[in-house]
Amino acid sequence: TTTTTVTTLNNNKLNNNNIIIELGFWSISIMSRQVLLACVFLATLLTQSCSLPPWSWDTIQTYVHCANRTGEWNEEALQVLASQPFVVFEKMHKVWAPPVNTSAEDKIVESCKLVKSINPKTDCYMYVESDWARTWYSLGQWFSNNPEHALQCPHNGSFVNTTDVEVLDKGYPPINGSTKFTYNFLAYDFSDSDARERWIERITNATKSGFVNGAFIDGNRGGFGSGIIGSCSKDKQAAWAKGLNETIYTLATRLGPNMTTISNYPTDDALKLCTGGMMERGGSIESIMQWQNKRCGLWNGPCLLDYHAQYADRSIASFKSDIANWLIGVYKYAYFGVGGGWGGDGVGACSSWLHRYPEYSKALGEPNGIANVTNSSYGLVYTRSFASGTKVFVGQYLKPDNPQRPQNKGECIFWSDGYVTGNSSQCPPPHTF
């Protein structure tokens, strides 16, 4: 948890002998002789802690975003989850555990409770979506039973819908004699006030449990539009997008400054409402560095970056490359995640997410400033050092072995204990930078 200063103070007014103070969505009216008390109250509001996950420069800060589709996490998995600053439980979490194919909200709350029983400081977030009303959630069941509130385009009675097929992991025993399951989902209509309210309450009800700290919001990738409204008229599309914007805004105000919302593929407009964003498919050093000075959410706090190193689980070479590039750009409240897929079954569920690489426990320390960027004979070179003595080099140190796609690029982490991540022969000695 961090403390930030709220910048939404506005319209403070003196009205006869009364002082009326309006702060965001709170308003108080007091007699002038109570000004001192009011100032104390106001100072408390202005210094409310905005909710971001725990942070430390001691080691690389990681997270887990996944679902065990067939049941609860085992003890080994729970211990890893509870060691994270935050976890996100995906849409199919425990979908095939009783009650089958419904009640994801309650199932996620239950798992968050278990994680927090081990470590109360780990933030736990519920995956939610803004496209399909998946019936794995009680909310999706409500839309199936009340289809008049679902999206109908291009005209009333024409329900926008999708079919989804899910298959058990290879080798997992059939459930009720089947290994394949087919679902049909309606779409959310954010131009419908009842739909908006139900969508918001799904999250606020979960946070009231005390075990859920916010939500990961998927579906509105790249803005407040969506592919699901393609068959709608332009007026309907505009009303839908406006409704989604209003929904996220209302959600943020109801959650207040002590809950977290993460927008996937976030735009600047989304980050005005949400406290952070996810780079689902990773990104360049420059794209990470652009986050360092961003401010996010209604309370203008620091931005959480949920960075997913796409495909880094597929080879150790990819992992080493990604983590070196990550350390060049990392800043406070930027978290690193490695995992293939978003769910799995049984004991082996989410094994790539739960895997602990040696680098995760290496001493880091605060950075000695931002990365140094220089232009060498072979292009840009990035270097950075940390308080522990750990140093990072990313760039073309050797003459390129292939002018178009060099395979000998230097991406090295020289850890303070002497351990090296990457091929040190492709990087300069650490004492030289």
Image (spheres, helix red, strand yellow):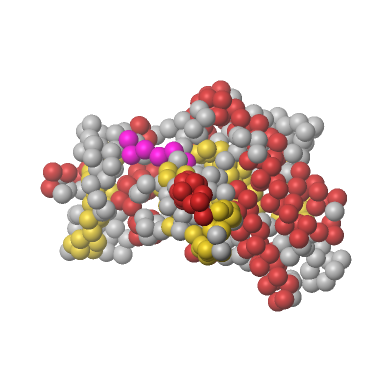
Q: Left of 174 or right of it: where is 9?
A: left
Q: Left of 140 or right of it: where is 321?
A: left
Residue at 66 percent of width and 45 percent of height? 204
Q: Position of residue 86 (x, y in %)?
A: 50, 39
Pick the residue in front: 20 or 428: 20
Q: Left of 118 or right of it: where is 107?
A: right
Q: Position of residue 288 (x, y in %)?
A: 38, 55
Query: What quarter of the picture does the N terminus occupy?
Result: top left
55 drawn magenta: yes
Q: Position of residue 151 (x, y in %)?
A: 77, 63
Question: What's the magenta region?
Answer: 52-58
Residue most extreme to the left = 432
Q: Is residue 77 visible?
A: no
Q: Position of residue 91 (x, y in %)?
A: 65, 44
Pick the residue in front: 206 or 331: 206
Residue at 66 percent of width and 68 percent of height? 242
Where on the picture, by quarter, is residue 74?
top right
Q: Is 330 located above or below residue 174 in the figure? A: below
Where on the picture, by quarter, is residue 378?
bottom left
Q: Is 404 located above or below residue 89 in the figure? A: below
333 drawn magenta: no
Where on the picture, by quarter, is residue 320?
top left
Q: Left of 228 or right of it: where is 293?
A: left
Pick the residue in front: 64 or 340: 64
Pick the residue in front: 342 or 18: 18
Q: Is residue 81 visible?
A: yes
Residue at 35 percent of width and 60 percent of height? 286
